[in-house]
Amino acid sequence: MHRTLFGMTGGRVGAAPPRGGVGTLFLLSTGRKTGKVRRNGLYYIEDGQNLVVVASNAGENVDPQWWKNLQATPDAEVELGTHRQPIHARPATAEEAQRLWPQFDAGHPEFAEYRERAYRRTIPIVIFEPRGDAAGTEAESR
């Protein structure tokens, strides 16, 4: 639903800035098998100039495809409203994850449940660092 609203309104509806610390963005990454651009709506928090997301996959015991794609090709873009920003994705360090988890838990208590459910894997926190044109560009029409 977020994707449809975002596309129909040119980014004015469907992605949200952080409220209570957690917002919604769209990740545009390259499929590692197909080479096609994939779009995923993700919750995020801000950490300085970085955007931070969680590869929770709703607590499943397998990483989400978007994270597997980013591990293969870490340069991607995010859309925040009509703003498009190039990013480089990397896993958070253990120290960063320890510092950032409480912010996600405060914004969405489901994250604690996801960590319990995904007992066979550690759910990664992923840091999106700005790259290249840090100011970003206007999102292209869909």
Image (cartoon, rainbow, N blue to C red):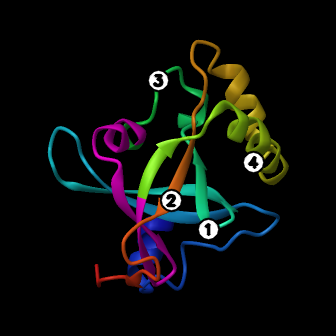
The residue tagged 3 is: 62
Q: Residue at x 41, y 86 (%)?
A: 10
CA distance for labels 4 and 1: 17 Å
Q: Which mark is residue 37?
A: none
Q: Residue 113, image x and y in percent?
A: 75, 30
Which of the labelled discs sits on residue 129, or is there none?
2
Label 4, label 3: how many angstroms apart (C-alpha)?
Answer: 20 Å
First of labels 3, 2 by sequence position: 3
Q: Contact (CB < 8 A) between labels 4 and 3?
A: no
Q: Does the image show residue 1?
A: no
Q: Mark 4 or mark 1: which comes first in sequence? A: 1
* Residue tagged 4: 104
Q: Nearer the viewer, mark 4 or mark 1?
A: 1
How many other residues sit within 10 Å of disc 3, few (<14), some (14-19) or many (≥20)? some
The magenta segment is 67-87
Amino acid beneath label 1:
Gln
Task: Mark 1: give few (<14), some (14-19) or many (20+) Cα within 10 Å.
Answer: few
